[in-house]
Image (spheres, grey):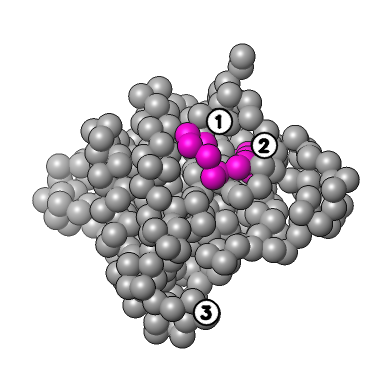
Amino acid sequence: MSDALDGFGRIVVKIGSALLVDRERGLKLDWLRSLTDDVAALAREGREVLLVSSGAIALGRAIMKLPAGALKLEEAQAAAAVGQIALARAYSEALGRHKLEAGQILLTLRDTEERRPYLNARATIGTLLQFGAVPVINENDTVATAEIRYGDNDRLAARVATMMSADLLILLSDIDGLYTAPPADNPNARHIPVVEAITPQIEAMAGGAASIFSRGGMKTKIDAGKIATAAGAAMIITLGNRDNPIDAIRRGERQTLFRAGADPVRSRKRWIAGHLNATGRLTVDDGAVRALHAGKSLLPAGVKRVDGEFRRGDTILVLDEAGSEVARGLVAYDAAEARLVAGLRSAAIEERLGGGARATMIHRDDLVVGRVGQEEVSEGTDHAR
């Protein structure tokens, strides 16, 4: 039997509150251990797994034995503060059984929507993956308010998948996929195994119901699918309330696959090429030009001159010494720092800026080589440089 996860190297898994937390008994530890068994199996195969986990408010509420009913904002945030500690400990212990480290990341909406926080979050999560750790990501419910929250972790998971150029987003749910109508209301509803594209007809199939512990429903899952597939990630919706839910996907248990619209790196590079105005220029030497065409990152050592004023994360042009555009991308340094490190190798950069200096001027994943409209999209495997 073929493995439904073949070909997916970087996978984001979203876990809802109702899967993790029972209102009476608290954390469903046996289920969590079965999930981390699946994560460990993927890690042994060399795949990268990121977990987007709800449950902090629900778990804190259970621990503190708060009464049923709606919570005030400050009560929900206090419950999240208690629940986050318990949730982080549970993930650490469950993954630790397989000698895997968990790294907690708490995000608010601005961390994926504003340029500088976005770059910082992406760099941190990427470094955790390089270390072999499993990022465990949640919305920062202790500080998020209506104005700066996602509102549900389905969309947060889709933003994380986009940010990290994931191949696949898995939404573990209380339903085994998309149906032509809500099956609880319509006994004639048919399961849809594959969605080629999210059309208005597909959106109309989504109901709005959510469980007592969750803020999501099928509509938010379709919204997440629109975000993820547009960025080049496939998405699977499947039943989560069974042991070893990821292994169940691999065995071919019922699920709905939403096909990706494009390769994630290609999609991101088209976005850089077509939607961002350049605010500065870097002139580079011939060696750097050759490296860029070979699919490498732009290193400070190859930069001859820095022009313009820009901030980290801005789009800038890369020019050869004749003044022709070679590439454009998202710069990793502010203009003032870029001038300080231009032409320097890594050791000299660390001496000048300290141990927190970044190795690349523009990372290869943030580069579009060629003039806009005739870009090259490099498909190298060197993610570090």
Going by the numbered disc 3, the residue's amino acid type is: Gly
Do callouts 3 and 1 mark residues in contact (Cβ within 8 Å)? no
- Mark carried by residue 248: 1
Dividing the picture into quadrants, the one containing residue 344 is top left
Residue at screen point 39% across, 77% down:
66
The stretch in magenta equals 231-245
Q: Is residue 134 above or below residue 19?
A: above
CA distance separating discs 3 and 2: 33 Å
Residue named by callout 3: 69
Which quadrant does the N terminus fall into? top right
Per the model, the C-alpha gap separating discs 2 and 1 is 9 Å
Q: Which residue is mark 2?
A: 255
The residues tagged by marks 3 and 1 sit, at their Cα atoms, a distance apart of 34 Å
In this rendering, the answer to whether 66 lies above or below 293 is below
Tag 1 or tag 2, which sits nearer the N-term? 1
> Residue 219 location, x and y as percent?
71, 59
Give the camera-side residue of 84 and 241: 241
Left or right of 68 in this view: 383: left
Of residues 189 and 99, the one nearer the viewer is 189
Residue 324 placed where, x, y %? 53, 44
Q: Is residue 51 visible?
A: yes
Q: Amino acid at mark 1?
A: Ala
